[in-house]
Image (cartoon, rainbow, N blue to C red):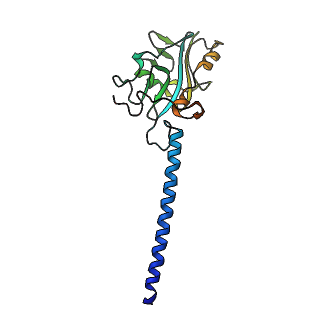
């Protein structure tokens, strides 16, 4: 019985070596797959533990587009308005989001813009009445839930509108919302790679 012990030990050793080599191969293959994906999606990476998505939006009040591209609305290394949602690089059309569950109303509030279910407060107060309404459109569709409950997700296209609900120009306003969020999120790689963000995941405030 003991004469077979060395042979048994050698066999077990080789089985262990083969098993270990196979495990190493599959680990390296998984790493290569992750690296390839990261190269193709440098900002939006499902393997990344950081949440970072984007949404396009416009605010139109009585047929006038609200411009949020000024420095006073931009998050930089010198100023911050919301810990997890912001604008930067003087682009007032793309919202950058770094945490789940942030409502659009909460993001606007950080920019001193109040959005409730019936009012929009900018320089003046615009509230729904018999002739004009505060409406929210998401991806071309009227949002029918309470406006303050809306939470944007990646590549949403958002319109906050105040005015005549029957205004035929609403269709044009919806068409004019940019579709740049996919560029920053890396979900439309055919458009190329977005530039480094001045205040992104690694921004120190």
Q: Which residue lies at the image location 44% right of the left edge and 29% below the top edge? A: 197
User: Which picture quadrant has residue 122?
Assistant: top left
Q: Which residue lies at the image location 48% right of the left edge and 15% below the top edge? A: 120
Can I make out residue 103 in this image? no
Can I make out residue 87 in this image? yes
- Name the image quarter holding the N terminus: bottom left
Task: Give the answer, above or below, for where 4 lies relative to 48.
Answer: below
The residue lying toward the viewer, choosing from 192 and 66, is: 192
Callout count: 0
* Position of residue 75 measured from the top left corner of the image (x, y, whole percent): 39, 23
* Residue furthest right as drawn: 168
- Name the image quarter holding the C terminus: top left
User: Which picture quadrant has residue 190?
Assistant: top right
**Left or right: 128 with respect to 168?**
left
Task: Give the answer, above or below, for where 25 lies relative to 139.
Answer: below
Task: Give the answer, above or below, for where 149 lies relative to 6.
Answer: above
**Left or right: 80 with respect to 167?**
left
Q: Which residue lies at the image location 38% right of the left edge and 34% below the top edge? A: 202
* Position of residue 3 measured from the top left corner of the image (x, y, whole percent): 44, 89
* Position of residue 8 measured from the top left corner of the image (x, y, whole percent): 46, 81
């Amino acid at each position: 019985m003991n004469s077979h012990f060395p042979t048994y030990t050698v066999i077990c050793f080789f089985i262990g070596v083969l098993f270990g080599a196979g495990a190493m191969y599959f680990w390296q293959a998984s790493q290569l797959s992750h690296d390839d994906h990261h190269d193709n999606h440098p900002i939006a990476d499902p393997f990344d533990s950081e949440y970072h998505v984007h949404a396009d939006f416009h605010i139109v009040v009585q047929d006038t587009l609200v411009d949020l591209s000024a420095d006073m609305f931009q998050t930089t290394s010198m100023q911050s308005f919301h810990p997890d949602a912001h604008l930067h690089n003087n682009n007032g059309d793309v919202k950058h989001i770094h945490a789940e569950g942030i409502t659009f109303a909460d993001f606007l509030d950080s920019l001193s813009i109040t959005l409730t279910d019936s009012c929009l407060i900018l320089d003046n107060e615009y509230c729904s009445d018999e002739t004009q309404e505060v409406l929210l459109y998401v991806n071309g569709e009227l949002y029918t839930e309470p406006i303050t409950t809306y939470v944007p997700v990646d590549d949403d296209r958002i319109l906050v509108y105040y005015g005549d609900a029957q205004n035929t120009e609403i269709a044009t306003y919806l068409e004019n919302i940019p579709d740049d969020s996919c560029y920053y999120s890396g979900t439309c790689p055919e458009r190329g790679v977005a530039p480094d963000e001045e205040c992104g995941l690694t921004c120190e405030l």
